[in-house]
Image: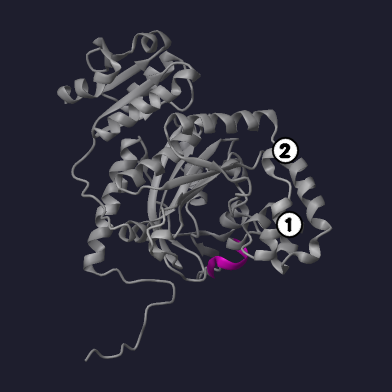
Amino acid sequence: MASTPGFKRPRGTQDILPEEAERWRRLEALVHRHSAAFGYGEIRTPVFEESELFIRTAGASSDIVRKEMYTFRDHGGRLLTLRPEGTAGVGRAYLENGLASAPQPVKLWYLGPMFRYDRPQAGRYRQHTQYGIEIFGASSPLADVEVILVAHDLFERLGLTDVVVHLNDIGCPRCRPAYREALVGYLVSRVDRLCADCRERLARNPLRIFDCKDEDCRGLLEEAPLSVEYLCPECRAHHERVEEGLTALGIPFVEDPRLVRGLDYYTRTVFETVHQPRDTGTDAGRAERVLCGGGRYDGLIEELGGPPTPGVGFGMGLERLLATVAEQGLEPPQAVGENRALVFVVSLGTSLAAEGFRLARALRRAGFAAVNDLLERSLRAQLKAADRAGARWALIVGEEEAARGVVTVRDLRSGRQDEVPTGDVVEVLLREV
């Protein structure tokens, strides 16, 4: 008979035993290789940071700051917090380590524990493991599309189907004040129907009310003004290009005009990737789960004291992802070895960006690392970036090449350049490695 232990693990944590640890190792190895295939570099930041970092970026009125942070004073009297999310710490590291002066964009990924005092439930723990990516220095909608693509293709590699992106645009500092005024105007005459938390949110950050889980509040919001109705021309154009990019890549998405994210630093694009399996006759088969969430945060670096710097990224809880994979009868695949040589895909012109993304995607599926330009630069600037990245080849997709159904393959070691039919590019490069 097993003896009763004198101590138990803290509520909202878990012990990962050897059999389960093997699944974790395989998923972590897949994350490493997958991130590198898109040209992201790994960053590891401290598990705790100055509390003010999260208060300033997440927002003093956010649930994270008000209810969920693990905060303590060290022996020197400094107020510190176990990180509740990853983006703020990565942004701090980007500034502190001079990455703002490096060639842009800077593409980073991380994997590690996060801590939130939340009500434990299936797939949600007070200590959980988060995989995230961040792009700093790219304002183009192509960066938003790539961030969503990184998550979508990881789910594809795990064998998950029925994954749908929920997409919204919450505007920028220029157009959001008008929306805020309209939303407050709608809610102020109905304030007696809001829960106590939402009454406080109404004064501090009314967009946060869309996060409320109270059924009465959610019902009240059915007729509320929507952010997409108040977008400025720049935000609307940005949102349309994100939609066009996802459509061109065949990534399923739905407009979710009431979607907001629970952190104050978000601007413009916000999204969640949701597993929505078809009804299989079992509760597990019908369960919906948010597997990933993120968006654009163009004011974050400036809020931390740096120069105006666009940013976009996502965070993904691996406990919830592993649970979903297991429920579908799947296992994380074995990620063996390193990616093949790096290929830089040069797309010339906005209209050819989608073709460049599709070509890079095909290369990654064949085991290459492949990078797309996210700054929409000239041919010369992109080739310079390819050389700086250490790419083995540059694939040039221009209007003339696209019209003839070919791609220019440039060997960046020898300088040799050949035209190859688009459908043969992967096979040609596979023969070269």
Magenta span covers which residues? 65-72
| Residue occupying image coordinates x 52% and y 50% | 88
Total residue callouts: 2
Camera-near label (1 vs 2) is: 2
Give above or below for 112 relative to 136.
Answer: below
Q: Pointer 1: what residue? A: 204
Q: Are marks 1 and 2 in contact (CB under 8 Å)?
A: no
| Residue occupying image coordinates x 53% and y 70% | 72
**Can you tell which mark lies on residue 383?**
none
Indicate the quadrant containing the C terminus: top left, top right, bottom left or bottom right.
Answer: top left
User: Please, what is the three-letter code of the amino acid marked with disc 1?
Assistant: Arg
Q: Position of residue 297 (x, y in %)?
A: 57, 42
Whether residue 98 can be seen here: no
Q: Pointer 2: what residue? A: 230
Q: Position of residue 263 (x, y in %)?
A: 59, 53
User: Is residue 204 found left or right of 141 in the rendered image?
Assistant: right
Q: Nearer the viewer, residue 163 or 351?
A: 163
User: Please, what is the three-letter code of the amino acid marked with disc 2?
Assistant: Tyr
Whether residue 141 can be seen here: yes
Residue 68 part of the magenta-drawn span: yes
Q: What is the secondary structure assignment of the residue under circle 1?
A: helix
Snapshot quadrant of residue 195: bottom right
| Residue occupying image coordinates x 52% and y 63% | 81
Mark with earlier residue (1, 2): 1
Q: Nearer the viewer, residue 110 or 327?
A: 327
User: Is residue 199 found left or right of 367 in the rendered image?
Assistant: right
